[in-house]
Amino acid sequence: MNTIFNRKSILFFVCSLLLICSAGTVGYFYYVQRPQILEFDEQRDTPFILDIFNNDWYWLVSEYSTEFSPQYMLHYRASSKAPENIGNLTIKTMYIKNEPVGFVAYYKKNFYEGYILFLALLKKFRSKGYAYQLLSQAIEDLKSRFVTKIRLVTRTINTPAIKLYTRAGFKETSRDDDGFVYFQYTVAH
């Protein structure tokens, strides 16, 4: 009887230890691997965002936008080169363990309308749910600024982006002959 009790005690102790260790591993993964969404810092973030633009220019910028400059956008936090737009752009970046993941750039276009200008990730972080987190951050921030509609545009052949926007609650409003699809998110009251 005493031997059975000792075996059960040892088994209980080993199981408890394994449970504690696995919970610690899960906790470590959750807290250390958890992405952080940060305010844009020009010195820290410009290199990786410019790298994204260099690699994915076609997906991010219309060929009709001959005046667009990512350097200007980042430096002046401006949605366009119009002087009145200097400082109107909010840029959030995402990091995991000090490694850049991606960014989202958005602004309040007018009193009731927000616009998501860019949402992009480095290639190795795609299809992991990070774009949805950045998009959700932008939506929540724009909602806190009392917008009632949020708009964005992507290419008609950008199937992953279309699925993401639809999943997040955006509705397609139109398509044009140049290969772009327009979306709108209506804030529920």
Image (cartoon, rainbow, N blue to C red):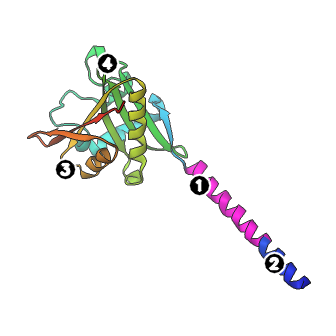
Label 1 or label 3, whichever comes before in sequence order: 1
Label 4 or label 1, whichever comes before in sequence order: 1
Q: Amino acid at mark 3?
A: Ile
Residue under label 3: 157
Quadrant in which the C terminus appears: top left
Residue under label 1: 29
Instruction: Look at 38% across and 52% down and name the residue there.
Output: 126
Q: Is residue 55 left or right of residue 141?
A: left
How packed is label 3: few (under 14 Cα within 10 Å), some, or many (20 or more)?
Answer: few
Q: Amino acid at mark 1?
A: Phe
Label 3 or label 4, whichever comes before in sequence order: 4
- What number is the disc on residue 111? 4
Instruction: Look at 30% across and 33% down and name the residue there.
Output: 186
Q: Is residue 103 left or right of residue 110?
A: right
Disc 4 vs disc 1: Cβ atoms closer than 8 Å? no
Label 2 or label 3, whichever comes before in sequence order: 2
Disc 4 vs disc 2: Cβ atoms closer than 8 Å? no
Q: Secondary structure at mark 1?
A: helix
Marks 1 and 3, how far apart in space?
Answer: 35 Å
Q: Amino acid at mark 2?
A: Lys
Label 2 or label 1, whichever comes before in sequence order: 2
Q: Is residue 19 magenta?
A: yes
Residue 149, picture quadrant: top left
Q: Amino acid at mark 4?
A: Phe
Instruction: Look at 49% across and 34% down and name the residue there.
Output: 38
Residue under label 2: 8
- Pick the front one: 41 or 88: 88
Instruction: Nearest to the eye among marks 4 and 1: give it.
Output: 4
Q: Is residue 61 visible?
A: yes
Marks 2 and 3, how far apart in space?
Answer: 61 Å
